[in-house]
Image: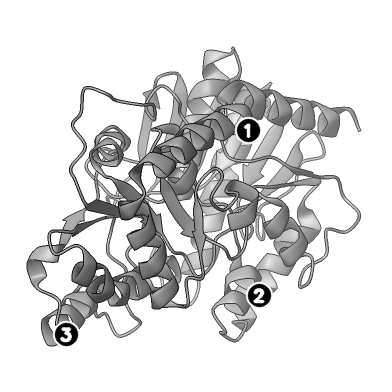
Amino acid sequence: MHVCFITSEYPKEGFPHGGIGTFVKTMSHELVGRGYKVTVIGINVYHNSTEEITENGVSIVRLRPKQFKGITWWLNYKSINKKLEQIHQESPIDIVESAELGLAFIKKNKAIKYVIRLHGGHHFFAEAEHRKINWWRGFQERRSFRKADGFIAVSNYVKTHTAKYLSYHNKPIEVIMSPINLEIFKPQPEIEEQKHTLLFAGTVCEKKGAFQLVKAMPMVIEQFPDVKLKIYGRDWFFKDGRSYISFLKEFISKSEIDEKHIQFEGAVSMYELAKCYAEAELCVFPSLMETQGLVAPEAMAVEKLVLFTECGPGKETITHKDTGLLCNPYDENDIAQNIIWALQNKTEGSAMAKKGRAYVLANFNMDKVLQTNIEFYNYLKEN
C-alpha cells in the first residue's frame, strides 16, 4: 500500500511545528516500518525552494511556494496536483490523506481513495472561538468534504461537533485517536522531579488557555510562594502581527505576578519535551477548545499527573480524580484550585498518574492505532 499525506506541516529539524506535523511524522515512520510506502507532499514553508528528501524511509516533497497576488492558492495547488500525478505514475498511490481543507482543489483519480482526518477545521474552531465563518475558507472546507471517500476523527467530540456544520455525505467515518510515541514518552525515573514546577506545552495562544492559566497563578503563588510555571511552545500572532507571548509578558508585568514565577521556554523537540514532562510536578493544559490534544496523553504516558480541560474531548481523555484532573478552562479560580489540590495531595496525584499512564497504554498505543488505520484504509480500497 502507498499512502500519501498532503500537508505542509511535516516537521523540519530546527523549526517549530504543531500537532498535525507531529502526527504525520509519527504515523509515516510507523507505516514505513511495517513495510508500507509513504510520501508526504506539501508547500515548503521553511525555504523558498523545492526540497525532496528521504527520512527514515519516508519520501518528503516540499514544493517551492508560488507567490502571485490573488492566485497564490491556485498555483500552489497546481504544483501539488502535478507532483501527485508524477508520483502516482512512478509508484501508484492507494490512499491520499489530508486535513479538513486539504482536498478542496486536489484533482481526484478513480484509482485512489481520499481520506480527511478531522484534526479540527475552520467551521469547528470558528464556532468554538465565536468567530464568523470566513466565506472562502468555509467554501474550501465544504468542497474538500464532498471530495472525500472517507473520514477519520481523532475523537468522538470532533466527529459529532463537526457534523453540526458539515456533511459527511454518508461516507464511512471512523474514530481513531492519534498515537503517542511510547518509546519517547515514557517514565524517566532518572530525571529528578522539580518540586512545585508546573508545565504548559502547546502553541502559546488564546484557544490553548494560556491566558487563563497565567491569570490563575496569583492564587497558586499565594499558597505556594516557590511555584514555577514553565511554558513550552511556539508563539502565536494576532492579525496585526503582535506576539501572544509578548501580550502575556505585558500582562504579567502589570499584574502582581513576579516574573520569576513564569518562564517562557520556547519550542522544543519531542525528546526534550519528554524530559520536561518528567521534571514537572504537574502538567497543566486548560485549553478552551481541542479536537483531541496530544500533550495531555503524552504527559500521562510519562506518568505525570495532568490537569486537562473539561471542554471538548477532555472527558474522553481523563476521568476526573481517577486518571487525572479536569478543570473549567474559562474559570481561573477553578484552574487554580485544581493546581493547589494537586500540589497538596502528592500521594493521590501519583496514584492517578499511574492510572493515567495505563489508560494511555491501552488506548493511544501505536500498534492499536496503526492497525485500526490500516484496516480502514483497506476497507476504503475494497469498497
**Residue 303 lies in what quarter of the image?**
top left
| Residue at image mark 3 | 255
Lower sequence index among marks 1 and 2: 2
| Residue at image mark 1 | 363
Q: Nearer the viewer, mark 3 or mark 1?
A: 3
Counting the numbered discs, the total is 3
Q: CA distance from mark 1 to mark 2?
A: 33 Å
Looking at the picture, does residue 238 appear above or below residue 54? below
| Residue at image mark 2 | 138
Q: Secondary structure at mark 1?
A: helix
- The local crowd at label 2, few if under 14, some if 14 to 19, many if 20 or more residues have their Cα within 10 Å, is some
* Left or right placement of residue 30 versus residue 152 in this view: left
Viewer can see residue 2: no
Give coordinates of residue 336: x percent, y percent. 36, 69
Q: Secondary structure at mark 3?
A: loop
Contact (CB < 8 A) between labels 3 and 1?
no
* Left or right placement of residue 325 versus residue 381 in this view: left
The residue shown at (38%, 40%) is 347
Give coordinates of residue 290: x percent, y percent. 55, 61
Q: Which amino acid, by three-letter code, is at mark 3?
A: Ser
The residue shown at (64%, 58%) is 100
Looking at the picture, does residue 364 appear above or below residue 75? above
Lower sequence index among marks 3 and 1: 3
Viewer can see residue 247: yes
Contact (CB < 8 A) between labels 3 and 2?
no
Give coordinates of residue 52: x percent, y percent. 38, 33
- The local crowd at label 3, few if under 14, some if 14 to 19, many if 20 or more residues have their Cα within 10 Å, is few
Q: Which amino acid, by three-letter code, is at mark 1?
A: Asn
According to the image, what is the colour scheme of the structure?
A: one colour
